[in-house]
Structure formats: structure tokens, C-alpha cells
Image: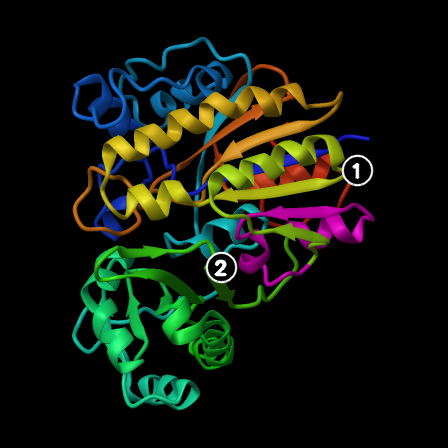
Amino acid sequence: MARVFLTVLDSVGCGGALDAAAFGDAGSNTLGHIVQACAAGRAEVGRSGPLNMPNLDALGLGAVIRLSTGIETPGLAAKPTGRYGAASEISRGKDTPSGHWEMAGLPVPWDWTYFPNTEPAFPQDVVDRVCALAGVGGILGNCHASGIPIINKYAAEHIRTGWPICYTSVDSVFQIAAHEEHFGLERLLNLCRDLAPMLHEMRVGRVIARPFIGSAETGFNRTPNRRDFAIMPPFDTLCDFVSRAGNRVHAVGKINDIFSGRGIDTYYKGKGDASLFDRLVELMTEAEDGALVFSNFVEFDTLYGHQRDVSGYARALEWFDSRVPELLGGMRAGDLLIFTADHGNDPTWVGTDHTRERVPVVVAGAGTGEIGLCAMADIGATVAKHLGADFGPAGRSFI
């Protein structure tokens, strides 16, 4: 029986969203602008020349960018041997839960709550709740920020006072950074877990624990022990449908957090994208007939998109592509291998936040041809049909 490997390259959008202007993102194009920067010699740190992704390009990645936005893609010009298209989102967010829920058949049925870009950013009752749960006299940050800079700014004061570093973004998130040793990892996770019900009641999508280590002398670094406490999906998703059909669902990366564990049999969090890829390769052998292996590779977003690091983003894409043959070589007859994304995060764009874009859909195991412009929910509908599972009303199979 066939298996499906649904693989999300977090934030690897392909531009062209018709409603991008409503988000302030008209013209954003994560993949397209990286391709252009590489071809123009503007992404030369740790790499050089045009973007080199021959394996995904052979399946149709370059064709996806041209389909979505009409721009040229120097370095990505292969004639596709797979199925390819570009998917649009209808949920009113450009964040992780919105993208993943929608591709799994559940467009978000409400408006998320976002915190204002002011200082302070959080209502006093939320601050009071954090302080009460943590047993501290205050918080640090209380603003919109990118994770690594705000940790560097407040880490020393955090260690001295014990106050957690709390921040948000244009996404519907409440993030808490704390030192694993001085504050304690379990204490941080418990704080976020206990705070989450209050934030979820407010329709804030995620409370995210952002542990870090280090010192002022050695520098501070985030650890792989991040944990997302996401709001529970209000209706069934692809994972529920596949599980109900009697098939196994394996989650790799933050998928288990995004879906609050619903419909998921096993999960692996890993220690960075390299370890996640190793686990995905293992599952090409281990996954049962009829299984869904749902994975997310987050470092494109966290390390390079939000940091506006074009060279780093290009390096990460080239690294990922270099390992794609390991996945293709592990496919069995009838398997589908789908590469997609959940939103954009154009490293050439202003600010540090996600960008509203279409996402690529590149498929191995389904023949050759253009899928065209499709809905994000069509991804989940295709997976469900291939695995003989029911699916909700959103989406239709493109195979």
C-alpha cells in the first residue's frame, strides 16, 4: 500500500499571493529573490554563484517560481520530471498554524489575536499571569522583537533578575525566552504550558518556549529544546482522517506541537534540521504501508528568514537539496513525496517577519506535469485520497 511523505520547508514561499498587499507584502518572493540575489553575486557568504538546487529543480521547483510570479530563475531551469504547482492560502494569517492547518484541510475559522507593536505590547493581566506562574516580580522585553537579538539584549539582566524575556511578532504568538541553567528548562516549559490556556482563550495561536544557553563571555545561543504550545485545532485535520482510516501518522519536527498531538502516533523533535533529515531518511525504510510521514524543517525560517540572511538561506536550501536523493532513493512503488511550505519569509524584505506568498508544491511519485495554481487545502486532499482516507470539505486532490 502507498505511503505519503509530506515535507514542509518552513517559510520557503514562491511569491505571487494575490492578497499580499493587504499584509504589506506586495512583491515579496522568498525563493525568487534568493535566486536573483545568488545570480547577481549578492549571496556569497559560505557559498558562491547561482542557486544550486538540481534535485528539486529537476522535479519542478524552478518552474514553480516562474508559474507563480513569471520571473526568470537563473540556475533553476530544468525541464520538470515531477508534478509541480503553487498553492494559495485563504486563512487570514501568514504563520505556522494557519499554513499547516490549511494544508491539512482546516482553513483557520477565526481571526487570530495579535499584540500591538507598542511598548509595552502585552495587556497587564497577561503580564501578571506570567509573573504569578513564574514566581517573579516582572518580565523583560514586552515588545515586538526577533528572537536572537532580544536574547542578546536582555540575557545578562535575565540571569541577574530571573525575570523571563517575553516578546511577540506580527504573528499570533507569545514567546518566552529563558536560560536553561539559570532559569531551568523544565521551569520554562511548565510556565509556557500553564500560561497557554489563557492565551488560547484569547485566540493567540501559540505560546512558544525559547530556551537558550551561554554567557556574556561566550555568547548566547538558542537550544533545540524549543516547544510550541499551540491552540487545539477545532475540527478534524488530515492527521485525524488518516489515523481514523487505520493508517499510522509519524511527525518529524514541530508537527506534533502544531496539531497538539491529535491523530499522531509517533513524533521526533530532533536537534536541528540535520537530525530531522536523518530521521526522515530512516522513516523511508521504517514507515509502514499506508503511513503518512509529516515533517517540518524550521531552520530556513528561524535562522535565515527572520535574520534576513540571504546567503545563509541559500546555503540551507542547497544543503537540503543535496540530501533529496536520499529520499528519492528510499521511495517504494506507489509512494508520494511532496515538498511544500507554510508561508514565506523573504530574506530580502523589510522587517523581520513572515511574508504573504504562495507556496511551492513539488511532487515525486505522481508522474510529470503542471498542477497549476491550486489551493493549499488541495495538498491535504491529495494525501488523503492517496491513502484511502476521508477528508473535510476544503480542498480537492490534484492527482
Q: How many marks?
A: 2
Q: Is residue 170 left or right of residue 274?
A: left
Q: On the image, which quarter does residue 45 sit in?
A: top left
Percent across and percent down for residue 49 are 25, 15
Residue 176 visible, this orientation: no
**Label 2 close to label 1 by CB (< 8 Å):** no
- Front residue of 225/175: it is 225
Percent across and percent down for residue 84 are 50, 23
> In the figure, 48 relative to 139: above or below?
above
Percent across and percent down for residue 268 are 61, 50
Q: On the image, which quarter does residue 72 sit in?
A: top left
- Front residue of 35/382: it is 35
Q: Does dot 2 land on a helix, a strand or a loop?
A: loop
Q: What residue is shown with label 2?
A: 108
How is the rendered protein coloured? rainbow
Residue 31 in the magenta stretch? The answer is no
Q: Nearer the viewer, mark 2 or mark 1?
A: 1
Q: Is residue 22 left or right of residue 326?
A: left
Choose the circle earlier in sequence order: 2 or 1. Answer: 2
Determine the residue positioned at 44% across, 44% down.
342
What segment carries the magenta color? 238-262
Q: Amino acid at mark 2?
A: Val
Which mark identifies residue 240? none
Of the 4 image quadrants, the one containing the C terminus is top right
Q: Does dot 1 land on a helix, a strand or a loop?
A: loop
Q: What residue is shown with label 1?
A: 288
Determine the residue positioned at 53% across, 40% down.
275
Q: On the image, which quarter does residue 150 sit in?
A: bottom left
Q: Amino acid at mark 1?
A: Glu
